[in-house]
Image: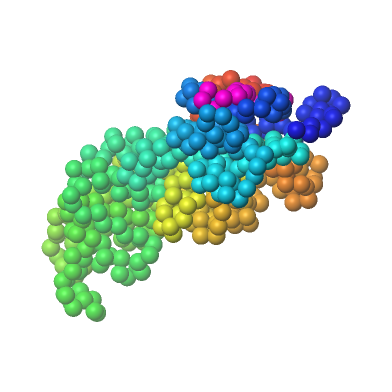
Amino acid sequence: MNEPSNTTRPNGSTPRSLSLQDVGPSPSILVVDDEPIVLRALEKLLKRAGAKVLALDSALEAVAAIEEELVEVALVDIRMPHMDGLDLLARIKKSRPDTEVVMITAYATIETAVQAIKLGAYDYLTKPFDNVTDVVAVVRRAVERCRLQRRNRELEEAIEVKTSFEGMVGRSPRMREVFEVIDSVAYSSSTVLIQGESGTGKELVARALHKRSPRKEGPFIAINCSAVPEPLLESELFGHVKGAFTGATTHKKGLFEAANGGTLFLDEIGDLPLPLQGKLLRALEEGEVRHVGSNVNQRIDGRIVAATNVDLERTYREGRFRKDLFYRLNVIPIDMPPLRERTSDIPVLAHHFLRRFSTRDRKTIEGFTQETMAALCSYSWPGNVRELENVIERASVLCREATIDLHHLPRHVAENGGPALSEDGTPLSGLPYGKAKEIALAAFEKRYLESILEKTKGNISESARLAEVDRSNFRRIMKRYGIDAKRFA
């Protein structure tokens, strides 16, 4: 192995090309080679780069070690006595599927390379090594891939748990509160008012209330009050008799009657015309409706769930919505948080949508690069979950690689999701990729920590819990960026 004569900078730090510290916690590396010189050289190199290294000269010892040690990357020589590297590769992948294996050989051939890849090897290196930076670079990529796959699996497991809640995905405290309210009030027949911005999933909440209620065997009927022309809306809601108006050639039941025994979901209730608001109030208070053109009242027995993306308190103060109707609808309020207020749900939602679209299109996409996820988590999402879903569908269709990268995202998400400039004002596009990535990720981490500390008023323990990060690690990251929790108290 030809090591450079000076692998440290004047200040004693290790050059980035020879460091693994930027991938996160020290990676655990297994090195297996029966040549003592190569084994010790690799052990020394990887330890200097910041890894925890287990160096073994026997494949049989490695089989036992892999059962006990959680190894992220294994560097395995192909030619060894008693058990060759390909057999060890197969044993490692069977025992530890997440461990990435890099094969080492002095006799590289196309046949052995193909066989190694088929058995699950991540890459292979030929010795003697021309440049130690190439070795560290391969190991770094293998560590990132291992951690990406592990994170994807954890997210998949989280998705499985959360999607059991009637198709809704979320594990943030705000969404857990929504799930708890739904569970608590689903049994009741009281009217529910769901308020939230467009795209937050208000209809999913209405459907969850229905599915968990005693009325689940009855119909779930939804109408968008802003999508039906005003002259037709009264007939749609309350029904009409034959001859009630031009074109009324038959008797027709309204949606209130059709929802008997079930749930009627009135979406965008804030756009209901004032004349119909009075009729709706009467129907809710008396449990009866009157067909257009009739003098006979009809009993109704459906639960009413309404939703709006406007502030109804403000609209009734402005005279555009009846105050008495607001209070009649707002018996049980449920507020849906915008996506920007539950950023911890973005990775879970992104993987949920990616799985759906890649399955639909028969693709195998493993997940997202770190830069892409950082951009997704930093973007403000004015269109909320619906916008995120559309962005992931677009990225899934465009992607031809194993992971979603920044260039698969719409430009406004990729550029606005992270900092466009470095600290000295240099555009990131004018910097080398590695440096731009380092700046973007650092800016994201700092913004994320500050926002979560602001939410918890500087409570480090609560912030670490919300971030799902060990408290000591949370403090370490705070220290790295010079963040003082006291200024958020």
Residue 465 versus residue 180 in the image, above or below: above
Q: Camera-side residue: 28 or 466?
A: 28
**Seen in the image, is 254 located left or right of residue 321?**
left
The residue at 41%/37% (across/down) is 157
Decide which of 449, 368 is in the foreground and name it: 368
At 44% from the left and 35% from the top, the residue drawn is 94
Looking at the figure, which quarter contains the C terminus?
top right
Q: Is residue 128 visible?
A: yes
Check the image and name the residue furthest to the front: 81
Based on the picture, tell me whether residue 437 belongs to the magenta stretch: no
Q: Nearer the viewer, residue 351 or 423?
A: 351
Task: Give the residues in magenta.
Answer: 48-61
* Place of residue 225 in the rendered image (x, y in percent of width and height, measured from the top left): 35, 60
Above or below 237: residue 419 = above
Quarter occupied by residue 299: bottom left
- Which residue sits at x=50%, y=51%? 365
Q: Is residue 49 left or right of residue 389?
A: right
Quarter of the picture containing the N terminus is: top right
Q: Residue furthest right?
A: 10
Q: Position of residue 93 (x, y in %)?
A: 48, 36
The percent position of residue 204, horizontal first and vertical second, equals 35, 49
User: Percent position (x, y) of residue 41?
Assistant: 72, 27
Residue at 87% from the left image edge and 26% from the top image edge:
10
The part of the image, by quadrant, that contains residue 42 is top right
